[in-house]
Image (cartoon, rainbow, N blue to C red):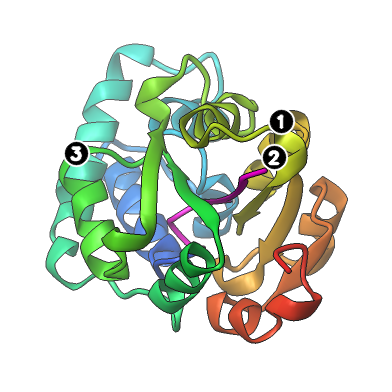
Amino acid sequence: MERAAVFDVDGTLVDTNHLHVTTWWEALRQAGHRVPMHAVHRAIGLGSDDLVAHLLGEDRDKDQDEELSAAHKALYGQYFDRLPALQDAGRLLRHLDQEGWRVVLATSAGGAELSALRRAIGADDAIMATASADDVEQGKPAPEPVEHALELAGVPAGRAVFVGDTVWDMQAGTRAGVRCVGVLCGGIPRADLEEAGAQAIYDDPAHLLASLADSPLA
């Protein structure tokens, strides 16, 4: 049977979490919202609408949501030509592809942003498909993004592993019934990832690649 290796992108394969923190913080600041950066960091990994709701609450002026998202996109877009892949991210995907894994990305990014992320990783030849939050009704921590990735791969949950860097990733993967692997390069503490469902945790893609023989991706 085929196997699927599903990967989050921001903070997992590309070192972008703190760029997102800074640009979301600035977008919020410009709109008159004082939100601590540590709170923004904990919300990274949610889709734009869910992130704004998480940070500002349900009683916010929801008419402002699109403006906040657009401001973040404009600020973050300034970095598209220099997004830094995490060490060995591309090598990890290529190795798994060569070992027979169907590699699928599960991300809330789309359009030009997703193209920039894929350029940074530089392993398009190893990526079978991409599941975007735009393709589902609910983003992470709902299971739909991971479930959609499995549909694209044509692989059941029991034959899949999901790698991510946030609590939202681990919750989504657990709810989808897949084994979850956490990485620390997104800045979320090990204990939080474990509590959310991570069955194994590595420092970053390079650490996971070096440890594959003893990992859930063996």
Residue 47 seen in the current view: yes
Q: Position of residue 196 (x, y in %)?
A: 80, 47
Residue identified by numbered label 3: 111
Q: Nearer the viewer, residue 58 or 155?
A: 155
Q: Residue at x 58, y 76 (%)?
A: 204
Q: Mark 1 = which residue? A: 176
Q: Are marks 3 and 2 in contact (CB under 8 Å)?
A: no
The image shows residue 3 at horizontal and vertical percentages of 63, 48
Where residue 165 appears, as percent x and y from the top left, is 61, 59
Amino acid found under the numbered disc labelled 2? Gly
Q: Say if the magenta span includes residue 22.
A: no
Residue found at x 48% / y 68%: 98
Q: Is residue 193 left or right of residue 146?
A: right
Describe residue 87's horizontal placement relative to residue 1 as left or right: left
Residue 8 within the magenta-colored segment of the rendering: yes
For marks 1 and 3 on the same chain, the one whose residue lies earlier in the sequence:
3
Which image quadrant is residue 70 in? top left
Q: Nearer the viewer, residue 95 or 122?
A: 95
Q: Residue 64 is drawn in which quadrant? A: top left
Q: Quick one: 2 or 186, which is closer to the camera? A: 2
Which mark is on residue 173? 2
Helix, strand or loop at mark 3: helix
